[in-house]
Amino acid sequence: MSEQSTDLRETVRERYAAAAVKVTEGHAACCGPQPVEVDENFGSTLYAADERDALPAEAVAASLGCGNPTAVAELRDGERVLDLGSGGGIDVLLSDRRVGPTGKAYGLDMTDEMLALALANAEKAGATNVEFLKGTIEAIPLPANTIDVVISNCVINLSVDKPAVFAETFRVLKPGGRIGVTDVVGDDTLTTDQRAERGDYVGCIAGALSFAEYRQGLEAAGFTSIEIAPTHQVADGMHSAIVRATKPTAATTPTEATESADACCGVNACCTSGETSADPSLTVTEAKTASGCGCQN
């Protein structure tokens, strides 16, 4: 990771750590937890009143998203759900209610302060089939093919490596699994510099992809049935959008596809420093000779 990317990630971490501390300290004050300051385009007001009222006040106060992904993901009983960038836990707790006792809701966050807040909120809510994990959304600490639905609320735009996020999301989803994400997306006519002029990185604007870039990123990871629908404008030419996509039922990961193609000579990663024989009983040279491969070096 470049120094600039490392600095951006740390800036994001500090921003959301401070938000968690504000909510936690507000809980000890006479007036209860204070919501993190956002405008009408972000935060808990984007959830229905009955959803907010059923959750701990601290989970609602810590909401910083641009939508309600638990609604757009159409969660069902028994499903396993993963929330990328789970923050204070509002979407994990709502997911818990939707998937029921036979399902499970995971939350993933890199910020210790947010994880502590989320765990406290889960205890207050009496949620028993939730689990919060520490890690980054570019390296999800879960096995492949184990999740039915991935949700996220205005977090992917904050990543410094969005192709890795899409690839990791694809990896952990079961074949036939889906994503239901809310995120900030820019008009295709805006350049990267023009997006940065409309807001900073930690404010969910400067790091946002365009509609075309978002679609291309999901396609490159292997997703199909991609839908990106704007819901409301958050800055000039920048929109909160609902993003849906599906992992094919017979999905082949990009890595698997590459290895399969490379093995046509009897060798994986042919003509690279990492080449290996597709048949463990043969050396690389023997495998190439047996297959008639023209690349004998």
Image (cartoon, rainbow, N blue to C red):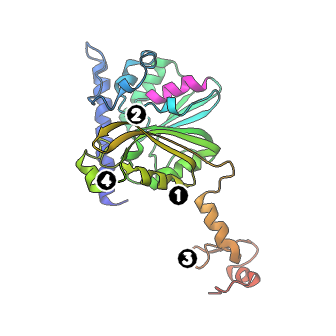
Residue occupying image coordinates x 31% and y 20%: 33
| Residue that mark 2 sits on | 87
| Residue that mark 1 sits on | 220
| Alpha carbon separation for disc pair 3 and 1 | 25 Å
Query: What's the residue type where badge 1 is placed?
Result: Ala
Query: Can you say whether 88 is above or below 224 in the image?
Result: above
Q: Work out which quarter of the rendered image holds the C terminus and state it.
A: bottom right
- Residue toward you, 36 or 136: 36
| Residue that mark 3 sits on | 273
- Mark 3 or mark 1, earlier in chain: 1
Q: Assign a secondary structure to mark 1.
A: helix
Foreground label between 4 and 3: 4
**Span of residues in magenta:** 90-100
| Residue that mark 4 sits on | 190
Left or right of residue 162, residue 24 in this image:
left
Callout 4–callout 3 Cβ contact below 8 Å? no
- Mark 4 or mark 1, earlier in chain: 4
* Image position, residue 156 (x, y; %): 42, 45
- Mark 2 or mark 3, earlier in chain: 2
Query: What's the residue type where badge 4 is placed?
Result: Leu
Residue occupying image coordinates x 26% and y 50%: 196
Query: Can you say whether 77 is above or below 224 in the image?
Result: above
Any part of residue 207 in sight: yes
- Residue toward you, 96 or 285: 96
| Alpha carbon separation for disc pair 4 and 1 | 22 Å
Circle 2 packing at 10 Å, graded few (<14), some (14-19), many (20+), is: many
